[in-house]
């Protein structure tokens, strides 16, 4: 069995890490570069930085963040938020990011995924998907979860895989920030639909939630934010717990 990954996620707004519940009520969680450095030293496997700032100079912001992070940490990291063109991807990768997360722009222009995978390789391209269960159907949302689309989750991830995406980062908007556990059923269904790795996001609140996720083999990696940022579950403690419970982690 492939070792499971633990990935802290840092939502960055105006240069600060923030965290909310169901994508709302954001509160400050610290400096993203300092937090990233701490997680790297604690044994996190990867990091994800999502720039959620509304800025006209997005490309410059992405470049600065990638450079600062690359200077301080020695584990792979993904940059997302405001990635809208091949040039944006190039800027992030050239400034030190290992992968790039694409969300809203891919929904608007799915051809971007084909172009990105062809230009940089599938291993660099992560499709970030925010979805909400509405009347029994998982509906993809964009613009930080504020805009429902016409896309259904499972058909969208299948299309993304066919277009060359190397990994799916799925956030359940219903579970985000609730600390009640991951959307395991949806993830298991996704695993039936695609062959590429899945990162589970949204709902982590206790160590057992990670164990349940991995015992079900519902995802290749687990991503969380507030439980790490506010010291509720330190990364080394979580990894030791998983190892003790026969979950293979890196």
Image (spheres, rainbow, N blue to C red):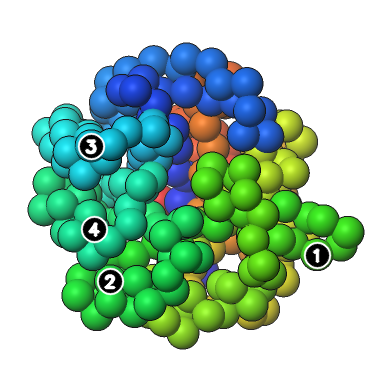
Please give the name of the residue rendered at 68% of the width and 45% of the height, measured from the top-left corner. Answer: 173
- Distance Cα–Cα, label 4 vs label 2: 8 Å
**Left or right of 218: which side holds 19?**
left
Q: Is residue 242 visible?
A: yes
Q: Position of residue 74 (x, y in %)?
A: 19, 40
Task: Please tell me whether mark 4 sits on a helix, a strand or a loop.
Answer: helix
Which residue is found at the position 74% from the left and 62% from the top?
138
Viewer-closest of 181 and 108: 108
Instruction: Say which of 21 and 9 sits in front.
Output: 21
- Residue 27 appears left or right of 105: right
Upstream in sequence: badge 1 or badge 2: 2
Q: Along the polypeptide, which appears first: circle 4 or circle 2?
A: 4
Residue hosting label 2: 116
Q: Where 246 falls versus 50 (above or below)? A: below
Q: How would you rate the neighbour count of disc 1 (Cα within 10 Å): few for under 14, some for 14-19, many for 20 or more?
A: few
| Structural distance between the alpha carbons of marks 2 and 3 | 21 Å
Query: In this view, which residue lies farthest toward the front?
Result: 56
Numbered badge on residue 89:
4
Q: CA distance from mark 4 to mark 3?
A: 15 Å
The CA distance from mark 3 to mark 1 is 36 Å
**Label 2: how many residues lie within 10 Å, few (<14), some (14-19) or many (20+)?**
many
Q: Which mark is residue 137?
A: 1
Residue for point 46% across, 57% down: 103
- Give how far across and how far down residue 26 sits, in percent: 56, 21
> In the figure, residue 204 lies in which quadrant?
top right
Q: Residue furthest right?
A: 135
- What number is the disc on residue 57? 3
- Disc 2 is placed on an element classified as helix
The image shows residue 122 at horizontal and vertical percentages of 31, 74
Label 3 residue SS: loop
Of marks 2 and 3, the one in the foreground: 3
Q: Earlier in the sequence, mark 4 or mark 3?
A: 3
């Amino acid at each position: 069995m492939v070792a499971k990954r633990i990935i802290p996620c840092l939502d960055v707004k105006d240069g600060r890490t923030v965290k909310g519940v169901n994508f709302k009520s954001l509160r400050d969680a610290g400096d993203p570069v300092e937090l990233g450095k701490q997680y790297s030293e604690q044994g996190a496997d990867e990091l994800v930085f999502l720039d959620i700032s509304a800025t006209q100079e997005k490309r410059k912001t992405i470049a600065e963040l990638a450079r600062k992070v690359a200077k301080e940490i020695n584990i792979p990291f993904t940059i997302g938020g405001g990635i809208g063109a091949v040039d944006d991807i190039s800027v992030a990768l050239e400034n030190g990011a290992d992968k790039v997360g694409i969300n809203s722009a891919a929904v608007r222009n799915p051809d971007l995924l084909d172009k990105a995978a062809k230009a940089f390789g599938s291993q660099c391209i992560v499709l970030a998907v925010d979805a909400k269960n509405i009347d029994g159907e998982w509906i993809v949302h964009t613009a930080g979860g504020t805009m429902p689309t016409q896309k259904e989750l499972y058909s969208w991830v299948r299309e993304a895989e066919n277009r060359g995406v190397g990994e799916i980062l799925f956030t359940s908007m219903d579970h985000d920030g609730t600390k009640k556990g991951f959307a395991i059923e949806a993830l298991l269904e996704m695993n039936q639909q695609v062959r590429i790795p899945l990162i589970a996001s949204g709902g982590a609140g206790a160590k057992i939630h990670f164990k349940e996720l991995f015992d079900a083999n519902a995802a290749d990696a687990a991503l969380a934010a507030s439980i790490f940022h506010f010291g509720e579950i330190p990364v080394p403690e979580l990894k030791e717990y998983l190892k003790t419970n026969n979950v293979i982690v890196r």
